[in-house]
Amino acid sequence: MNLKNLLDKLKQRWRETNQNKKALIILAGAVVLAGVFYLVLTLTRPRYAVLLGDLEPRDAGNIVAQLESDKIPYQLTDQGKTIMVPEDQVDEVRIKLASKGLLNGMGQGFELFDKSKFGETDFEQQVSYQRALQEELRRTITSVEGVEQARVHLVIPTKSVFLDDQGTPSASVVIKLKPGASLKPEQVKGLNDLIIGSVEGLKPENVHIIDTEGHVLNDFLKDSSDVAGAFGGTAVERQQQIRRAYEKELENRVQQMLTKLLGPNKAVAMVTADLDFNQQQTNTTEVLPGPVVSERSTKESGNDAGGGGTAGSTAQMPGQSVPGINNGQSSYTKSDDIKNYQNGTRVQSVVQAPGKVLRLSTAVVLDESVKNLDKTQIQDIVTAAIGFNPQRGDQITVSTMTFDHSELDLAKEMEQEAKQQDNIRLYLIIGAAAAGVLLLLTTIFMLIRRRRRQKAEQQLLQAQDAVVDEVAEEPPAPKWEIPPPVDKQKELKKIAEERPADIAQVLKVWLKE
């Protein structure tokens, strides 16, 4: 069967179809074509990715003008602060914008030294090297997962053979995280090691990494008690570091517990500790009983025969003569015992280590969106977690406020939009596949129906031929007799009685029609 015959049969089939079926076929075809067109349009539509975010209106206007002049499709989100371009063109567009100096905060790395400047001073070379190193570190940091933007500030002292004190290099990094993202401790440690290894002579205590909210990200590396001598600096600085490490330990303990109870981003805990860093030493001496080393006992007894005047009388006064009174003899006994002990002594020296907790002040803020919130119960839990002691004058405050979830909402919206786009693509693919299967089934059904109709028609033709043959086989009527008229209804009734199966098949075909 060639194409021409197929087209002719389709045309003939279309002419034989009634008006209702034609309208239904046209409507189904239009729906299928519209679905296929929308599917192709959606699948060929580019996926947009963030080019730059958190832009100032002036910078965003300049970048949009450049994109329009280059005829690059773009989308504006977050009230015009974020510019999105097709995902496969992000890197190319950034390179073009950087070459034209439109990217704020994106400078040149070691490309600064691709072109040498005649007459450049040592100071200019030092500044160029510092700028290039800052940009190279910024590029590396922004490639870390979760980091959206970063700024690097380096202090590199000038080397000189005439100076004894060359200065101390330091590095400060400000990181802007993506909405809903956070850096793991191992990631922060990796960035800290990266910066230390990139700047000559840089010490770990001179590296400061913070986020845009002012949180020190690498503070736990300095406060780690597992490393000997981690608390450096002057005595006051060491005391502040110890106090902050203790406060952070309590804050993390409370925060982890509240996160498990209320969910993430539902509570904030801050602890202020008053520690006593005075070192006190108390010496105590105790006398212990010992053995007897020497003992002496003396006893004395005797008689005393003497007389005298009346005590207190004037007989003994000069110039007086009073007769004496004789009381007779008297006896006496005297005893004296002396024992010498060798006593022992015990000296106890108690040194109170610095860092005694004098008072704790704890503040916990809960999100008002949390349902069935019992502040009293939360306060009891936090009290037990931090070791609350009212005798020290400890204080604890638990309050509820409305939290700012703008960044989290933005991240959720972007994630939902991405999921919706993926779902739409999936539904379109499923719809197109279902439409294709439906169209294929409809075609197969029509072909099967057509074959059945052709078969029924052939059976009907065979039945008619059989009727004609039977009529032809009957003996001819005599010439002198006028043949009676043939009653077709009777003939069909007769055929139906003789061949009921064929007639039933023909009637089924007509009913389907």
Image (cartoon, rainbow, N blue to C red):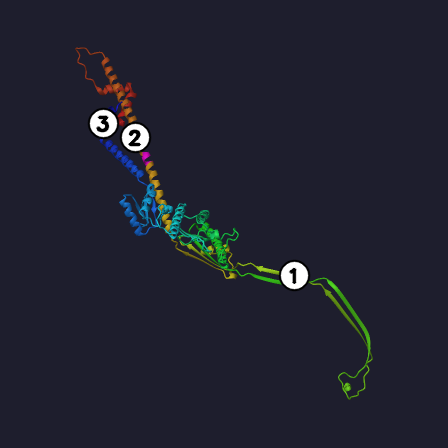
Q: Position of residue 140 (x, y in %)?
A: 40, 46
Q: Earlier in the sequence, mark 3 or mark 1?
A: 3
Residue located beneath label 2 in the image: 442
- Residue 333 visible in the current orientation: yes
The reply to whether discs 1 and 2 touch (Cβ–Cβ < 8 Å) is no
The secondary structure type at the circle numbered 2 is helix
Q: Which residue is mark 3?
A: 11
**Residue type highlighted by circle 1:** Arg
Q: Give percent across and percent down for residue 320.
A: 78, 88
**Camera-side residue of 199 and 284:** 199
Q: Which residues are magenta?
A: 430-434
Task: Check the image and report above or below for 171 versus 488.
Answer: below
Instruction: Please rate how many residues cluster around mark 1, counting C-alpha atoms within 10 Å: few if below 14, some from 14 to 19, many from 20.
Output: few
Tell me which corner region of the image, top left, top right, bottom left or bottom right, holds residue 321: bottom right
Residue drawn at point x = 23 percent, y = 27 percent: 11
Residue type at mark 3: give it: Lys
Quadrant that contains the C terminus:
top left
List the residue tagged with mark 1. 346
At label 3, counting other C-alpha atoms closer than 10 Å, the crowd grade (few under 14, some 14-19, many 20 or more) is: few
